[in-house]
Amino acid sequence: MRDALGEVQSVLVLGGGSDIGRSLVTRLARGRCRTVILAGRPEDEMDSVADAARSAGATTVETIHWESTDVASHEKVIGGVFDTYGDIDLVYAPAGILGSQEAFEDDPTFAARAFDINCTGLVSSCLVVAARMREQGHGAIVLMSSVAGVRARKDNYVYGATKAGLDAFGQGLGDALAEHGIRVMVVRPGFVHTKMTEGMDAAPFSTTPDKVAAAISEGLTKGSEVVWVPGILAYMFFVFRNLPRALWRKVADR
Ligand SMILES: NC(=O)c1ccc[n+]([C@@H]2O[C@H](COP(=O)([O-])OP(=O)(O)OC[C@H]3O[C@@H](n4cnc5c(N)ncnc54)[C@H](OP(=O)(O)O)[C@@H]3O)[C@@H](O)[C@H]2O)c1
């Protein structure tokens, strides 16, 4: 249960090795968050996030195996977290892959796998979370969408489509859970400097994991349902979303 000041005391991260997740978990643990459960594939990255969470003040820190594409396991794995650790205030879901449009076009099964990881697996997992949060009567779910899902571009429309699916799911889930006192936040960052974008040319208004974590944290305090990072992208994409297709093709080509 969030404390008297509304601060998160327990978090489950789906995609525990994420760079943005690392920043968020560290920030939460510097506050009042004492329980941090990192769910993902066993790897050094998750152990290093766990160490960062402990150094920042978390006292119960665990890593568990969770594979986004293994939807049959989600009930057991995620339900097990609620059974073992009790109430979870926040479920943060940064799992995802970027891939490349070229690789997706060369191998359509890879494109389908991107949907499985970025969208299908998170839909399955978050429905398990939603049922558990309804039982506990409180909680927040934060999903990582992207500006790429707001208006698809020809050079990353597969990734954009996975995010559009997740974004729509998050909005609908938020509406369905609102009356139960559970909030769902959809986060729409632009380009963030993380291992996912390493070696790529930064897009305009690029940002950092710490700034995304700060925006999420502020959004949780305010009860925001959609958060753009940086905020100016909300205005830019209001315009982009409404451009005629022929004009958008030219803008997206630049
Ligand atoms: N970086 C950006 O510019 C940007 C912009 C907009 C939105 N986003 C979104 O923000 C989220 C976090 O991104 P990030 O930059 O922090 O990326 P990141 O550091 O690469 O984190 C992504 C995480 O997803 C995990 N993952 C991938 N496939 C998985 C699977 N099948 N099952 C379980 N976990 C899996 C990865 O684990 P492994 O290491 O085991 O693969 C990794 O820990 C992503 O959803 C991303 O799409 C990022």
Image (spheres, grey):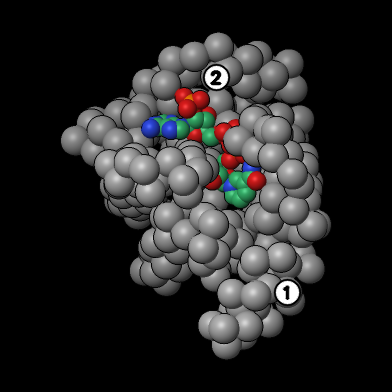
Tell me which residue sits at (38%, 49%) in the image.
105
Q: Is residue 200 visible?
A: yes
Indicate the secondary structure of the residue bearing disc 1: helix
Q: Nearer the viewer, residue 26 or 108?
A: 108
Crowdedness of circle 1 by 10 Å Cα count: few (<14), some, many (20+)? few
Q: Element at badge 2?
A: helix
Along the line of sight, the residue nearer the viewer: 198 or 145: 198
Q: Position of residue 139 (x, y in %)?
A: 49, 50
Residue 254 in the image, given as x and y percentages of width and height: 71, 65
Taking the image as shown, residue 208 lies to the left or right of residue 156, namely right
**Residue 203 against residue 64 in the figure, above or below:** below
Q: Look at mark 2 in the image and give the residue it sits on.
A: 46
Instruction: Quadrant for residue 20, please give it.
Output: top right
Q: Residue at x 69, y 19 (%)?
A: 52
The reply to whether residue 217 is in sight is: no
Of circles 2 and 1, the one toward us is 1
Which residue is identified by label 1? Answer: 236
Q: Is mark 2 within 8 Å of ligand 1?
A: yes
**Number of residue marks:** 2
Picture quadrant of residue 194: top right
The three-letter code of the residue at mark 1 reads Met
79, 103: nearer the viewer? 103
In the image, residue 134 lies at what x, y percent? 35, 54
**Lateral position of residue 105 relative to residue 20, left or right:** left
Residue 249, compared with residue 12, is above or below; it is below
Residue depicted at x 47% and y 18%? 63
Residue at (70%, 50%) from the top-left corner?
A: 191
Q: Looking at numbered disc 2 in the image, what kind of residue is underneath it?
A: Met
